[in-house]
Image: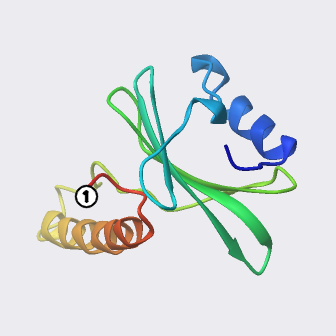
Amino acid sequence: MYTVKEEVKRAFANRFLKWGLLLEDCVIDSANTYVINKQSWEIRFIKDLDNRGKYLEFYCISSEFSDEHFKIYEDGSIEECEIIKAQYPFDPSLPGDKEIARKKYLDENKVVYDYLKEKGLYRK
């Protein structure tokens, strides 16, 4: 397996403590994508680098819970990221609000979906 700092392993384990998930549960899916399929979760993650340093970026899908998308940096700090939303709010008393909210929902989800696909973080 690749080398990951203990701070990253600990931050991941703490986030998924209820399910007992560990980074060591992963399998390599492609050149840069790793997958954990355990409990009710499918978790895809990649290694990457930005101006803050090296990190692992995760997209987590569960049949029981909302999606999660986050980065864990080498120091163990976590940055929350955008998810594909499952629903959208609107005010039924405002004419046209449902249509406006739906368009915004679809547009925002497309941006997130395209990003995740490009990074290898969403199902093929």
- Residue 91 as seen in the image, left or right of residue 65: left
Q: Position of residue 111 (x, y in %)?
A: 34, 75
Residue in view at x 28 percent, y 71 percent: 110
- Which secondary structure, mark 1? loop
Q: Position of residue 25 (x, y in %)?
A: 57, 29
- Residue 73 as seen in the image, left or right of residue 34: right
Residue in view at x 80 percent, y 53 percent: 77
68 or 52: nearer the eye? 52
Residue in view at x 70 percent, y 49 percent: 2
Q: Position of residue 67 (x, y in %)?
A: 42, 44
Instruction: Tell me which corner region of the image, top left, top right, bottom left or bottom right, holds residue 98.
Output: bottom left
Q: Is residue 112 above or below residue 84?
A: below
Q: Quadrant of the C terminus?
A: bottom left
Q: Quadrant of the N terminus?
A: top right
Q: Position of residue 97 (x, y in %)?
A: 19, 67
Residue that carries the numbered disc 1 in the rendered image: 90
69 or 31: nearer the eye? 31
Label 1: how many Cα within 10 Å (few below 14, some 14–19, many 20+): few
How are the colours assigned in the image?
rainbow
Residue in view at x 65 percent, y 32 percent: 24
Q: Is residue 98 above or below residue 36?
A: below
Task: Give the mark count.
Answer: 1
Q: Amino acid at mark 1?
A: Phe
- Residue 69 as seen in the image, left or right of residue 120: right
Q: Is residue 69 above or below residue 95?
A: above
